[in-house]
Amino acid sequence: MHPDHQRAFTEFVASRSDSLIRLAYVLTGDQHSAEDLLQTALAKTAGHWRRIRDSPEAYVRRVMYHEQVGRWRSARWGRERVLRTPPDQGVDDRTSEVETRVTLAEALRVLPARKRAVLVLRYYEDLSESEVARIMGCSVGTVRSQTHQAITRLRRLVGERVSLEDLR
């Protein structure tokens, strides 16, 4: 990689990693998997930097989306969760909050990957419909219909008690 391109790539990674790791975490649901996903996406981005340096974030987000879809399709991905150690101290009762998050997480897992990605980009990343369309490589109308269909399906799965604010 040309030294100027390498410097620009390094600056991009330094400035956007926090935002990108949050997206990766939402897509994977696990910190270690999120780090792996982001690392894979950045490695692929580095290989194409000269060609995509005008809009690298959109490229990285698209790579992360496609990589994660591939992982969801893999039969061996996500079957086991390793926990450090159980907590030694008691915590305040947050049962209803946890139940809502668990219910929502389970419902999100049922959604097809594309609909889940639309919800993540729209409500977690707080992107506009046009930004989501650009990242996903589709029309704004497709984003709108996918969002509507995903929300309708979520409401059927979890009932009206979960609001869109719970997605944020």
Image: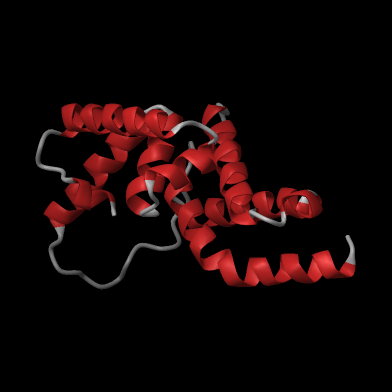
**Residue 46 to residue 116: above or below:** below
Q: Closer to the camera, 39 or 135?
A: 135
Asked whether 96 or 120 is in front, the reply is 120
Residue at left 17%, top 27%?
Answer: 156
The image quadrant where one finds the N terminus is bottom right
Residue occupying the point 59% across, 55% down: 57
User: Residue 78: horizontal and vertical position, in percent?
Assistant: 50, 38
**Is residue 110 in sight in this rendering?**
no
The residue at the point 25 percent across, 41 percent down is 104
Q: Is residue 31 above or below residue 4?
A: above
Q: Residue at x 63, y 72 (%)?
A: 14
Q: In the rendered view, does 155 fall on the left or right side of 139?
A: left
Depth check: give the residue in front, 4 or 153.
4
Q: Position of residue 107 (x, y in %)?
A: 28, 34
Quadrant including the C terminus: bottom left
Q: Position of residue 139 (x, y in %)?
A: 46, 31
